Image (cartoon, rainbow, N blue to C red):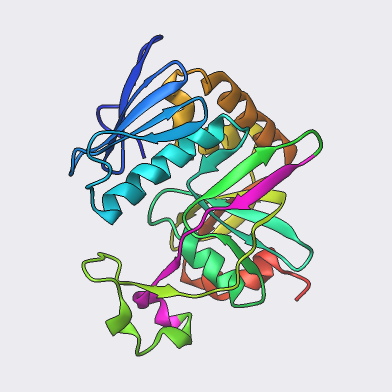
Amino acid sequence: MPGEGFSTTPLSARWRSNGIEGITSGSKSILRHLGENAELHVAGGRLTRGDGYGTASRGARQALARVGAILRLRQHNRYYVHASAVVNDKGLAYVFVGESGSGKSTLAFALARVGWTILGDDGVVLEPLADTVLAHGWRSRSLISSSLAFAFPELRGRESEAIAGDGRARIPVDLPSAAHARLAALVFIRQSPHGFLRPCGQSTALTGLIRQSPWVLLGDASSAEHFEALGRIAGSVPSFEFVHGSDELLRIREFFDPAA
């Protein structure tokens, strides 16, 4: 997400996101991979290869394309949010919004184990329409920490499958996925030994969405529409704060699938 060095002016913004430096002016952005000095340009809703892109590694190209797609989608009324999402048996999406390490993937996996469908593991795209909000999947493989074997017995004995160098020793898992669904609720999450689920207000929801969709702050040609869209999303569905620990994880159905 944009961090240190992120600043805006009325005419342009220089920012960074996961190893990508961006310079945005008006409706145009130049994206540069900091490790390999490869560029990708975004203009008029299109992505164009820049210097060094053709010889860059696959990982660098994927990182550039990911950020480029996020900016491009903004010009089509679709807004990326750092979140996970699942779809229940009624075809409704629940989106878990939170910081890295807050348990987004874990909660989505816990609900997938009881029959829900994965919509996104680490990102979701929200599209506000006249009478509803659609949640679109953001393609990425589900990753679950091997330390959660106490709650998910099927992870036992799979520690060797954890991604090399990953600080959370996460294991890739294959789960049934959905392409899109109507948004039912926003759930803002964090971890704590003492858990609870409670409603939160529209202003709290909007603040949480901005934190996890910070491209709204670029000050470019799409920022005003981005902000207005996040406000409509925050006001269109119920929002909740979910503080969770191991006990809430083991009782996940009681919170989000009470009829089961």
Q: How many marks?
A: 0
Q: Quadrant of residue 253?
A: bottom right
For the question of whether residue 97 can be seen, the reply is yes
Residue in view at x 29 percent, y 71 percent:
163
* Image side of residue 164 versus residue 7, left or right: left
**Above/below status of 259 relative to 218:** below
Judged from this view, the residue extending furthest toward the top is 10
Magenta span of residues: 132-150
- Residue 251 to residue 5: above or below: below
Coordinates of residue 189 in the picture (x, y in percent): 51, 52
**Residue found at x 24% / y 34%:** 51
Q: Which of the two residues, 246 or 184, is positioned nearer the viewer here?
A: 184
Residue 248 shown left or right of residue 170 in the figure:
right
Q: Position of residue 218 (x, y in %)?
A: 42, 23
Q: Position of residue 112 (x, y in %)?
A: 60, 72
Quadrant of res 254 = bottom right
Query: Furthest residue to the front?
Result: 54
The answer to whether residue 7 is left or right of residue 134 is left
Q: Is residue 60 above or below residue 259?
A: above
Q: Which residue is at a point 30% across and 66% down the rendered structure image?
A: 168
204 is within the stretch colored magenta: no
